Amino acid sequence: MKLSNRILNRTLLQRQHLLDRTTLTVPELCEHLIGLQAQDMLPPFVALWSRTADFDPETVSKGLDDRSLVRITLMRGTIHLVTPPDALRIAPHIQPELEKVPFRKGFNFGAMVGLDPEEVRAHGEALLGDEPMSAADMRARAAELYPDRDAGAVLQAWLYQLPVLQTPPRGRWGDSSRPVWSRVEPWLGALLDPAYPLEELLLRYLRAFGPATTMDMQTWSKLTGMKPAVTRLGDRVRTYTDERGRTLYDAADAELADPDLPAPVRFLGWYDNAILSHQDRTRIVPDGAAPPLRAFAAQVSPILVDGYLSGIYKVFTTAKIARLRISPNSDWTPADRAAIEAEAHALLAFLEPDRTPQVEILDTGADLRP
């Protein structure tokens, strides 16, 4: 069966809970989506606000404090907000790939080349121990141990080599404190689970992001061995083709969405996984051309109109005013503009309730900077 781009679009949005806001709890949604992109403090909150009904951001803060939620380096080497069971079972798949990064010539201009990886790891394990430590303290110790190397590079090497997570207060609602790191097992009081099968992880990916190609799965995870893992799933998956004739895999019990379903305007956070988790992003990004990652790094975020990335926005604040500036990627109808303005005001009411809101829709392709 051949699937149109429109079917793939609506199916992705439905599985991402971007068509109708869900009543799932935060941990339930985190498990369904296999984590929320959380490289910075704000994006997971925007992701949850866009996907859940009556979202209370304090639920995330409380979850981080009581350790029912954690911020950990996982897919694509980036921080994700996940449940403890997912931290323990996904990290063993990701960790071997992360550990290769620091000793490559391209890592920090070769800053770690020539050092013994096992010696570096042993120093990191002894340093971090069972108690959390700030990145600043770890960097200072790195400078003592390796005075002829860049201390920041040594710190980054440890953070790749060791299964670690970020502890509160960073990640709480409104808190962008500097990172404090802990090894995963002491923080959660449980051992990593290396027995969790890769194929089970990929089946979950399909239920949240599918149907998808094996290259989509690899783009999402930065892991290899996709095809053998999918083969092991046997009749638990079914196959389709896309408009270009490529094979798409899907969970056999998953349903496709009606391509005629309406898709409301949605504001996402920067680096949202709905945008970044396929090699071929045309199911949500027209022509596959999302803003470059360096734009996301400047806290530029996507807007979905009729289910597709159709503009970008950024919030600028002063003592009294919150300005949400929008740059369209295409021409919008009056109805689109009205829906975008309404959703923008709702987002500002969530993000900046104590500031006067201002929404500005600029000319197509305009620079977001004031």
Image (cartoon, rainbow, N blue to C red):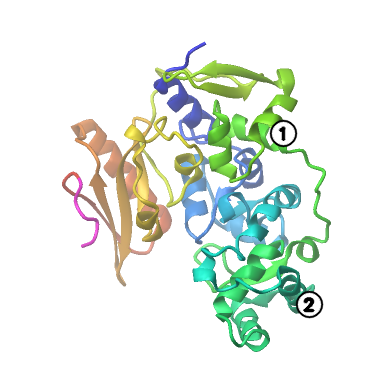
Q: Can residue 35 be spotted in the picture?
A: yes
Assign the C terminus to one quadrant of the image.
Answer: bottom left
Under mark 1, the amino acid is Glu
Mark 2: secondary structure: helix
Mark 1: few/some/many CA within 10 Å (<14, 14-19, 20+): some
Image: 93 above or below 13: below
Left or right, 358 with respect to 273, comes to left
Could one spot residue 168 in this view of the protein?
no
Residue drawn at (20%, 31%) of the image = 333
Residue for badge 2: 126
* In-front residue for pair 110/357: 110
* Label 1 SS: helix
Q: 325 left or right of 223?
A: left
Region of the chain picked out in magenta, as a range: 365-370
What secondary structure predominates along the stretch shown in magenta?
loop
The image shows residue 320, relative to residue 218, as above or below, that is below
Residue at figure coordinates x 37%, y 64% from the top left: 354
Name the residue: 43% across, 27% down: 9
Q: Identify the residue under disc 1.
A: 199
Residue 8: x %, y % from top left = 46, 24
* x, y percent for residue 45: 50, 53
